[in-house]
Image: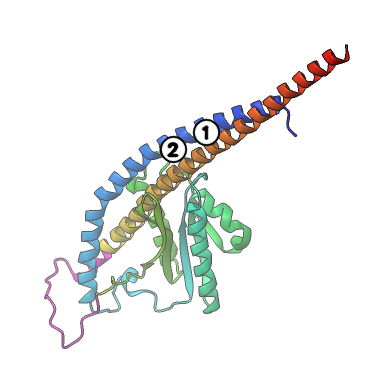
Amino acid sequence: MPSLKDLRNSIASVRNMRKITSAMKMVAASKLRRAQEQAQVAQPYAQRMAGILSRLAANYVASENSPKLLAGTGKDHVHLLVVVTSDRGLAGGFNANSVRAARGLIRQLLADGKEVKLLTVGRKAKDLLRRDQASRLGHTFEGIGSKRVTFAEAENVANTIVQMYEAGEFDVCTIVYNRFKSVISQIPTSTQLIPFALPEGVTKADSHEVRPVYEFEPSEDEILAALLPRNFAIQIFGALLDSAAGEQAARMTAMDNASRNAEDLTKKLTLRYNRARQAAITKELIEIVSGAEAL
């Protein structure tokens, strides 16, 4: 049975831990607000860009000069998975959920006879996937969004992936990240980025369907060649913003739960301490009374 001194030390340690988790909760709440605002500001541009490309792609007739980001390589064998997590832990199941979704997609692709390569954004993705997917790990990016996520960082990731694509290192690129839904809900999401995929509900125009007629200046291929890499970087940027907001939300929730658990543990330890102290006092009184009667 622990002594009174041990119980006092345990109570002090738990109280100090609660101060730390409470402070981390407040910091995460402040960062979450800024991350949410940044994500909301970026959404309209990304949605308009995706809408324009969707309309163009739906009416586009592929040719030999078609941009590869839209037309693809003509193959579907090598898949690149971009797995996005945070650099730090103490965020509950945030990182584990993203990596679990990536592992599920890897198993599915391997079962279909595909080859899989991995590119990680965030130290946790590299550390967790290195245990069983070390042979598939390639480029890794760390330190992104240490203060706030910038478009330059997203563009750097996008340029690396595009260079790999142009070098023929993969055929299909899919990003796996936690989509921010609310403070208590971050949804593991996988989205195909290369080749450009039409959104749900949008289909290619057929010969009998009346669609808007667009006039292009310069040519359609030149416009798409300029817009597609830009849109690709914007989609990466949006995923990083979502992940950053989800990380802070998950950390805030985890630290709130830790603070509550520390408070409950403090109450239990205090109760044990009071009982032990009462028992010690009672024992001393019994010894004093017994000694007095012996005299």
Q: Is residue 47 visible?
A: yes
Dot 1: within a 10 Å radius of its alpha carbon, few (fewer than 14), some, or many (20 or more) residues?
many
Measured in 3D between alpha carbons, the distance from the residue under mark 2 to the one under mark 1, in whole angstroms, is 10 Å
Residue 259, position as x, y percentages in the image: 50, 38
Q: Amino acid at mark 1?
A: Arg
Q: Nearer the viewer, residue 4 or 100?
A: 4
Q: Secondary structure at mark 2?
A: helix
The answer to the question of whether label 2 and label 1 lie on touching residues, with beta carbons closer than 8 A, is: no
**Image point (41%, 35%), residue name:** 26
Q: Quadrant of residue 67?
A: bottom left
Q: In this rendering, is residue 192 above or below 158?
A: below
- Which residue is at the far top? 295
Q: Is residue 183 left or right of residue 208?
A: right
Quadrant for the N terminus, please.
Answer: top right
Residue 211 on the magenta segment: yes
**Disc 1 target residue:** 18
Q: In this rendering, is residue 88 above or below 242?
A: above
Dot 2: within a 10 Å radius of its alpha carbon, few (fewer than 14), some, or many (20 or more) residues?
many
Q: Is residue 169 visible?
A: no
Q: In this rendering, is residue 274 above or below 130?
A: above
Label number found at residue 25:
2
Residue 164 on the magenta segment: no
Residue 64, position as x, y percentages in the image: 30, 78
Q: Main secondary structure of the magenta part?
A: loop
Q: Quadrant of residue 203?
A: bottom left
Q: Secondary structure at mark 1?
A: helix
Q: Amino acid at mark 2?
A: Lys
Q: Earlier in the sequence, mark 2 or mark 1?
A: 1
Q: In this rendering, is residue 283 above or below 95?
A: above
Q: Quadrant of residue 37?
A: top left
- Which residue is at the far bottom? 208
The span shown in magenta is 202-226
